[in-house]
Image (spheres, helix red, strand yellow):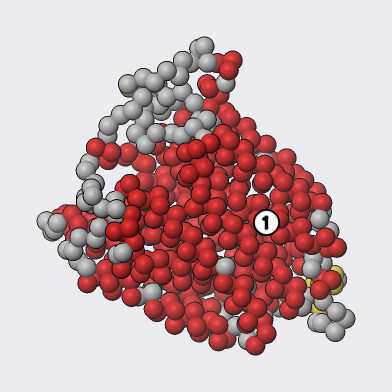
Amino acid sequence: MEIQSALTLVTAFLENLFFAGIIFGWPSLQYVLQREGYFSYLCDETTGNHTLQNRTEKVCEESEESFNLVFTLSLFSLCIFAVFEGHLLDRFGTWIVRSFGTFLLTLGCILIAVSTPATSWLLYPAMIFMGISGSTFLISNMPVANLAGSQTRGLIITFLNGIFDSGAVVFLIIKSAYDFGYDLKHVFHVYAWCTLFTWLRTFALMPSQRIPFSVTTKNFFYGWKEWVCFKKRYDKTEDPDIFTTDDESAAANIQEVGTTFGDCLRKVLFWSNAFHLSTTSLRINFYFGSFITWIDSFESPSNSSHLTNVFGIMLLCGFIAAPLNGLLVDGVIKFSKIKSLPTKVGLLRAAFASMLMTSVLAILLSVSVITQSSYASFAFLVITRAFVYGGNTTFLAMHFPEKHFGKLYGLTTAIAGTASSLQYALFQLASSVDPTFYFINYSFLVVACLTLVHPLLLSLQEGIKLC
């Protein structure tokens, strides 16, 4: 592998970790913003005040709902923008789309840096911009795995997704700096300057258009080699050796060639998978959005800070849990081959195992939240996230035609994003009639049990052509 390709892969991991999935560290940032007095103007003198380290923190139902809405809108923006990302990259190219995403990230950092408790409304556009930029970095980095060839492509994609989930560490670092006495504004000014890394990487280590699915790095010139001053040295005329045929790309798709997108939408399994993804995503994102409120309901203020730090550290371990779903799927497929079962049956059994494990983990997450088992809920959340999103991608890739994967993935992501936006309404409802989240958490437990319908349908479909 050439030096440029190696640098592209390494910096893709760094970018996903420090700039792409940062909104998932929202509990850490909310902790800091509350202590800075953001949205405190929504609280009147009769609301309860929390005291922490000789500082007065004014928190009320209205301010907590506003914080929850900020997170909901940023998450919704990330999910919805992902639907259009592939089309935008195909039409405008990587450089233009990534420049747009990087600009939004830088602007979001600046907005938080200049904001004050009196201008708390700036958090809305700032976090929305960060959500959109996160989607841009994640999807534009996926084709980078093609530079490593078919043997390690799947593993790299898995780690890119896992490190994206670990992006919560950024706001944890910011919270730690704040706890050590650094000013929040100064910290975000520094982070805004750090976004220069993404600008440099866009034009030096990423192609102006797209990285082909099967490519040899020897004759594929991209990044800084596309600059005008280097064009004479690196002629980008298409070479027949640029594209290569490996085992993965040469293998025939196991699905019917004539299957239309409409045919896929008429399959029950597509919609049961969408329900499975949407409800599990809602459970996970409600946990994120209500984390501080939930922890404060049964822990002391000092212990809440400690648990917030622990939660952020465990989210950092998301990249460790990410390959677990892939290992399970690969293991079931290999076992099916040993038993000389048909390929389609092996794929169905692999999907069944993945979806069943995801449902069980979602149930265990809900139980740990109901029993107020903080550390157990942290662990189950990290593992559940690793399974639910990776499982959805694997299911669609294995059981539907490759030509429709992008559209199906975008549609399921949009459905899940729309469902996740309901967490704000649920939070409002719970804040009014169920401040301890007793009934809402039991409701999530029931819904988690209902997700077992999807693996049940998969088991009934064994050996039947899906699409």
Q: Measuring 41% from the left and 55% from the top, which residue is drawn there?
A: 409
Q: Residue furthest right?
A: 45
Q: Position of residue 454 (x, y in %)?
A: 33, 71
Label 1: state its secondary structure: helix
For this rendering, which residue is in front, 44 or 441?
Answer: 44
Instruction: Judge left or right: residue 332 versus residue 280.
Output: left
Q: Position of residue 67 (x, y in %)?
A: 70, 68
For this rendering, which residue is in front, 201 or 406?
Answer: 406
Q: Measuring 50% from the left and 83% from the top, which residue is drawn there?
A: 443
Location of mark 1 (residue) = 127
The N terminus - image quarter: top left
Instruction: Judge left or right: residue 428 versus residue 446.
Output: right
Q: Position of residue 396 (x, y in %)?
A: 34, 56
Whether 381 is drawn above or below 184: the answer is below
Q: Measuring 71% from the left and 50% from the top, which residue is drawn there?
A: 108
Whether 161 is drawn above or below 210: the answer is below
Q: Amino acid at mark 1?
A: Met
Q: Measuring 33% from the left and 22% from the top, which residue is drawn there?
A: 241
